[in-house]
């Protein structure tokens, strides 16, 4: 079984770009999932651990390894050009890489006892060879050394920047020199990547709404466009942390007697404050400062209050309901931003791969989402020009050229009449690591894993109905 690593490596610049151009983007989460997958698309084993993120290890990562093989070579590592600064020494890279390789050992050990290994002598020998002599891939590298896996796909929160991708690849290879045939056999992208290519071989629209948020459209021609995904200090609108923080801030203002809207009596803050202080083990709102500004600050711990806050909203609490309504508007705005890209690529109707637990509060989000999703999209740049940040406008400003953005005060701020097609929300039934593995196998080893794309997702309404 397996793929010869000496086979020609297929590299599409649209999907595996050179170091100076960005790979698809980021979102949030709370854990690391590692899957070991063979060339028949069988998930041999899955292991989960603490979150991994190069920005201080605080979000979700999915890694997948695909197509066990029998021989390996090592290529010269790629480096950045003179325009790029050296990769930063981020505190979270070492933690993330340590967690990943520890989980790799776990999935190999689990796979050895799997039913697939018991029934397949060749697979069992491959796994035994990988586990022989210590941690998987810890032996020396070289042309005569058999790599443990042919390719690895890492779909990691916090890896929008190429420098972070390089740091993660180098960190994995430094810890496990013979895990892969060469450094560029590791494909690194944000956590939207795995979800998109789990749902479809050609990508699609992903909106992650968990601890944080991120939306990204992956087009069939290999291009991608993002909305959001800037972390809890600069964005993550509609995420679990954002919803809780927004509701709690409103409750504190009301409790302070802060008349935010002149002449309007603030809502009763006590239900939200009681929920937060009880869940976080605090006696007063003053003590809540430690959970947001203290050394033990954890986005995931705050975001965990989103579930009981949703129940409070369903009971009619106006502060909680407004927090979720605002989240629905933000999610609709992300869709509105990216839907024109999907339509331009030939999609009259759009399916959203809805990732993250906040989507399970769809009853609190849907009305505002639907309204916001169908407003016309903003026209941020001149007609026909792509992008905004890192696009023609910022490139021109960096080079001292005239600003290509509309200069007239009367320039239109919206484009078109809004999205009129059907919007369908789907939830994945398998780990997004599967899609990361499929993308890596196709781009690195030239192998198309036979995934059942019809069976990997289910309608969001069906998921919510099953939980009711």
Image: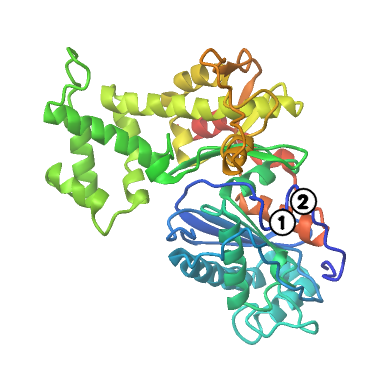
Image location of residue 97, percent across then percent down:
53, 68
Q: Quadrant of the C terminus?
A: top left
- Give the farthest residue toward the bottom: 133
Residue 353's x, y, as percent? 60, 36
Q: Which residue sits at x=41%, y=25%?
A: 364
Tell me which colouring the rendered structure shows.
rainbow
Q: Is residue 189 above or below residue 147?
A: above
Question: Residue 13, labelled with which disc?
Answer: 2
**Label 2: which secondary element:** loop
How many residues crowd around disc 1 within 10 Å: few (fewer than 14), some, or many (20 or more)? some
**Front position in the image: 14 or 266:** 14
**Mark toward the start of the polypeptide (2 vs 1):** 2
Residue at screen point 28% across, 32% down = 247
Label 1 sits on a secondary structure element that is loop
Task: For the residues labelled 2 and 1, say whether their Cβ atoms are less than 8 Å apart.
Answer: yes
Task: Give the camera-side residue of 151 and 14.
Answer: 14
Between 230 and 365, the one lying in front of the other is 230
The dot on residue 18 is 1
């Amino acid at each position: 079984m397996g793929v010869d690593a000496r086979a020609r490596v297929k590299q599409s610049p649209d999907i595996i770009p050179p170091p100076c151009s960005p790979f698809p983007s980021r979102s949030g989460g709370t854990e690391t999932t590692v899957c070991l997958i063979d060339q028949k698309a069988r998930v041999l084993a899955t292991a989960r651990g603490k979150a991994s993120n190069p920005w201080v290890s605080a979000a979700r990562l999915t890694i997948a390894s695909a197509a066990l093989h029998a021989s390996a070579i090592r290529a010269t590592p790629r480096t950045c050009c003179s325009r790029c600064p050296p990769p930063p020494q981020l505190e979270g890279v070492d933690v993330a890489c340590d967690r990943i390789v520890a989980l790799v050992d776990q999935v190999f050990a689990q796979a050895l006892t799997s039913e697939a290994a018991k029934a397949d002598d060749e697979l069992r020998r491959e796994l035994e060879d990988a586990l022989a002599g210590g941690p998987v891939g810890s032996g020396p590298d070289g042309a005569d050394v058999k790599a443990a896996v042919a390719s690895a796909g890492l779909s990691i929160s916090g890896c929008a920047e190429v420098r972070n991708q390089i740091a993660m690849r180098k960190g994995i290879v430094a810890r496990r020199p013979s895990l892969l045939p060469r450094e560029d056999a590791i494909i690194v992208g944000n956590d939207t990547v795995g979800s998109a290519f789990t749902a479809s071989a050609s990508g699609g629209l992903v909106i992650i709404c968990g601890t944080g948020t991120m939306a990204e459209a992956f087009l069939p021609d290999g291009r991608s466009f993002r909305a959001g995904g800037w972390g809890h200090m600069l964005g993550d609108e509609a995420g679990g942390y954002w919803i809780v923080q927004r509701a709690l801030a409103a409750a504190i203002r009301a409790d302070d007697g802060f008349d935010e809207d002149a002449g309007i009596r603030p809502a009763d803050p006590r239900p939200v404050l009681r929920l937060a202080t009880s869940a976080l083990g605090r006696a007063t709102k003053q003590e809540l400062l430690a959970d947001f500004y203290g050394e033990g600050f954890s986005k995931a711990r705050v975001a965990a209050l989103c579930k009981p806050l949703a129940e409070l909203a369903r009971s009619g609490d106006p502060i909680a309901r407004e927090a979720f309504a605002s989240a629905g508007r933000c999610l609709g705005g992300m869709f509105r931003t990216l839907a024109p890209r999907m339509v331009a690529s030939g999609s009259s109707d759009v399916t959203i791969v809805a990732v993250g637990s906040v989507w399970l509060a769809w009853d609190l989000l849907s009305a505002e989402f639907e309204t916001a999703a169908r407003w016309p999209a903003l026209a941020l740049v001149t007609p026909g020009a792509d992008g905004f940040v890192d696009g023609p406008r910022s490139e021109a400003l960096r080079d001292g050229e005239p600003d290509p953005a509309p200069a007239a005060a009367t320039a239109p701020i919206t484009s078109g009449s809004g999205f009129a097609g059907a919007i369908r929300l789907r939830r994945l039934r398998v780990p997004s690591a599967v899609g990361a593995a499929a993308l890596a196998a196709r781009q690195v080893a030239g192998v198309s894993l036979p995934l059942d794309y019809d069976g990997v997702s289910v309608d969001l309404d069906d998921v919510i109905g099953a939980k009711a």
